Image: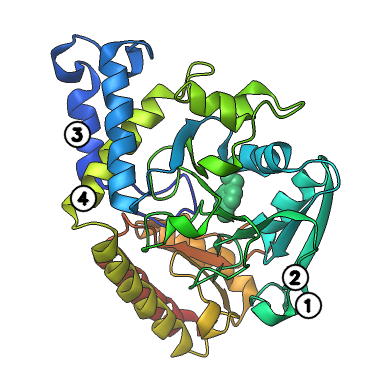
Amino acid sequence: MSRVYNFSAGPSFLPESVLLRAREEFLDWHGTGMSALELSHRSEEFIGIAEQAESDLREVMSIPPNYKVLFLHGGGTGQFAAVPLNLLSENKSGAYIHTGYWSGMAIEEARQFGEIHVAASGKDSGFTLIPPRESWVIPFNAAYLHYTSNETVNGVEFHTVPDVGDVPLVCDLSSNILSRSVDVSRFAISYAGAQKNMGPAGVTVVIVRDDVIRHNPHGVPSILDYERQAASGSFVNTPPTYSWYFVGLVLDWVREQGGVDVIEQHNIRKSQKLYSAIDASPFYSNPVPTEFRSRMNIPFHLADPSLEKKFAADARAAGLTTLEGHRSIGGIRASLYNAMPEAGVDALIAFMAEFERKYG
Ligand SMILES: Cc1ncc(COP(=O)(O)O)c(C=O)c1O
């Protein structure tokens, strides 16, 4: 079977050249007679792979030297716990911007570990917009402010980094990392699971500024403890070696594309094409105002919602897969991560026009 255009929100489409390279190296990584899957994490070979991936990530994201880059288990969800566990202390609270499903999950998880304030919420808009910065109420004792730069389910994206003064800013970059230039030095902590723009599930990148790494914080499990992970080079336990290796392959591909700036221009073009097709038709609609629309995840509805199942099934039969919306809101969702070529977006737009012609 030929490869399909996979619009999954994650794990998601990967560049074919990366998959081919992984296949080529699979049985015998660089003449070792072993797969990268089989290398000891303590071996010179794996340490080389790990260091190279870190240095490539530092280069493509311009990560300053006063930040540690950790490659951890536990996904974005692990960081929902790690952030309050590492940053909260007595009389301090965590502030959150609630812009949709995933920031909501971060808030719920953090509530288990301390006092949490929702500084602003897009709930009244049905999570279709980002509350204006002037309306945010950040408590005086905030140890940090957490936000989700791209809401994967709701299709809402921050297009600038908010200014929160001296409050350490924590950003969940899970679904738009490497999709656009971002000034990492604005964050105390940023993190992302790899399974959207960086590679397979199983490894989570955490970029943490040295001064927020606390010495020996009380009651933090060692695998979530930034200090212990930083001191051990993310080797507190056996790291997710194959996923880490794979991130390195994806980073090579990012560089081959010309880097994040070039990829960002592709992402702007791809997403604009799809939004234009949606806006041009009374048959399709996206509820998010232009200035908050995500370039990565584009949810939309059909005028007749009873046709949505058929839309996704027919699309799948036409080689355009995983267009079902998230189970919490339904509808259709097209995820246009870095690896989705413009031809995939064109094919989706052509399919949408044909579906509308038949059933509109
Ligand atoms: C923005 C965002 N944050 C966090 C998560 C949770 O990530 P994980 O499944 O790696 O825990 C997701 C998953 O899709 C996400 O999209």
Say few, some or many: other residues with alpha carbon within 10 Å of mark 3 (under 14 / 14 to 19 / 20 or more).
Answer: few
**Tag 3–tag 2 contact (CB < 8 Å):** no
In-front residue for pair 280/268: 268
The residue shown at (49%, 81%) is 359
Say few, some or many: other residues with alpha carbon within 10 Å of mark 1 (under 14 / 14 to 19 / 20 or more).
Answer: few
* First of labels 1, 4 by sequence position: 1
The residue shown at (74%, 58%) is 95
Q: Which residue is mark 2?
A: 121
**Tag 2–tag 4 contact (CB < 8 Å):** no
Label drawn at residue 124: 1
Label drawn at residue 342: none
Q: Residue 349: x percent and y percent?
A: 36, 75
Is 133 on the left-hand or right-hand side of 58? right
Pick the quarter of the image with the N terminus.
top left
Is 212 on the left-hand or right-hand side of 68? right
Secondary structure at numbered mark 2:
strand
Q: Residue 180: x percent and y percent?
A: 37, 63
- Residue 202 is at least partly visible in this image: no
- The amino acid type found where label 2 is placed reads Ser
Which numbered mark, 1 or 4, is in the foreground of this view?
A: 4
Which quadrant of the structure image shows residue 218? top right
- The amino acid type found where label 1 is placed reads Asp
The residue shown at (63%, 37%) is 78
Say few, some or many: other residues with alpha carbon within 10 Å of mark 4 (under 14 / 14 to 19 / 20 or more).
Answer: some
Which numbered mark, 3 or 2, is in the foreground of this view?
A: 2
